[in-house]
Amino acid sequence: MKPIQVGLLGIGTVGSGTFNVLTRNQEEIRRRAGRGIEITMVADLNVERAREIVGDQARVVADAREIIANPEIDIVIELIGGYGIARALVLEAINAGKHVVTANKALLAVHGTEIFAAASARGVMVAFEAAVAGGIPIIKALREGLTANQVQWVAGIINGTTNFILSEMRDKGLDFDVVLKEAQRLGYAEADPTFDIEGVDAAHKATLMSALAFGIPVQFDKAHVEGITKLSAVDIRYAEQLGYRIKLLGIAKRRDDVGGIELRVHPTLVPAKRLIANVEGAMNAVMVQGDAVGTTLYYGKGAGSEPTASAVIADLVDITRLHTADPDHRVPHLAFQAGELRDTPVLPIDQVRTAFYLRLRVADQKGVLSAITSILAASDISIDAVLQRESNDGENQTDVIILTHETAEGAMRAALAQMQALPTVLAPIVSLRKEELA
Ligand code: HSE
């Protein structure tokens, strides 16, 4: 059978990895897919550089629309990124009857509903394994491997840049700003790292996982997003003393008690003994808890040329295998059949329930602790552990660290406002959420 013909839009880091792996493993991939897969056209604004990568094996053009208009092309890979031109080209490719493979989490988290509907209407597939956690096959795990389960929650380290920064802050006791500069110097963080450090990239990925886990539409606008920019080394140290590590987690959790879904990204205390707490550097890991399977963990590289190419090519093989299948009986884009998505709401942050770590800078005088604990008790917030550092000579002030049991975010915010108003609380209170992940 004639090889399936692929057009590649954008041949940067992931695109060149895709081209190289597909060429290197061509024979094995053909044996797996049942048919050869060839990138026969590449579109990139930098035509010269693209030609250097592909040699005479593929035709290079500057205009992506030449690929979309070519009737020989079966699959379009979109590796341009962003919401602008990428959205237009993906929709045009779908309307031209091409299957689409994309690594673009931002595009799908924000415009996924429109894109998947267009693909279903046209009878083509949109595959996006590379959009979440790079080389880790988490989309396939959620959509296929765990399909028997009612997923209870998904929690992941899904941004390598921030995990690298947090690991360095812990190892070296350095503050965020210092480590960010070092990460940029070493190439672990982008020159403009905003999407990574503010938690936006992780929220795009968590949004996609929430849809696959719970059969709801992709709704990035409902996600609660906090990054790591305000995190200080001292809280990482106190957390360590209490047996916890701080990780930026993307969490999607079923809340049957209120008929909703929690969808949130924020720095989180995780027990140090959990495997996920020991995922260091730029690595990614995702935990999924299902009612039948229990807790599962997926670990690997979340970025990089060939790890991400591994996911892109897995999608090419899937599409090649399914190309001839009846469109109504393919694996659905979001794991649940398109007409079966629920309108279960993503809960407002006030209704989210977590335990908390609090750090209060207080005057070292009698009655301070009891005033704080009284406010927590009156707010129905139960204390799990308290740590008080001895004040340094002549300092007359100290840190009180409190771990609470699980409570509603709204109750905690009200209690925090009351505690902050105490004259003996001398600085803004630091509050971080804590998850046992058991
Ligand atoms: N910038 C992302 C990260 C990789 O640091 O993990 C691509 O999503």
Image: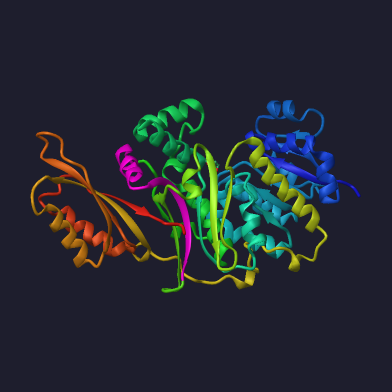
Please identify the quarter of the rendering in which residue 175 is found: top left
In the rendered image, residue 436, in percent from the top left (x then y), is placed at 42, 57
Horizontal placement of 363 versus 256: left or right?
left
Q: How is the image coloured?
A: rainbow
Q: Residue at x 71, y 57 (%)?
A: 125
Picture quadrant of residue 337: bottom right
The magenta segment is 230-255
Q: Nearer the viewer, residue 276 or 162?
A: 276
Q: Position of residue 325 (x, y in %)?
A: 80, 63
Residue 270 highlighted magenta (yes or no): no
Residue 230 visible to the viewer: no
Q: Nearer the viewer, residue 218 or 279?
A: 279
> Nearest the camera: 382 or 327?
382
Q: Position of residue 304 (x, y in %)?
A: 60, 36
Q: Residue at x 22, y 60 (%)?
A: 415
What residue do we see at 63% from left, 62% from top?
A: 146
Q: Is residue 196 left or right of residue 76?
A: left
Q: Is residue 278 visible?
A: yes
Q: Give left or right: position of 72 versus 251.
A: right
201 w.r.t. 233: above or below: below
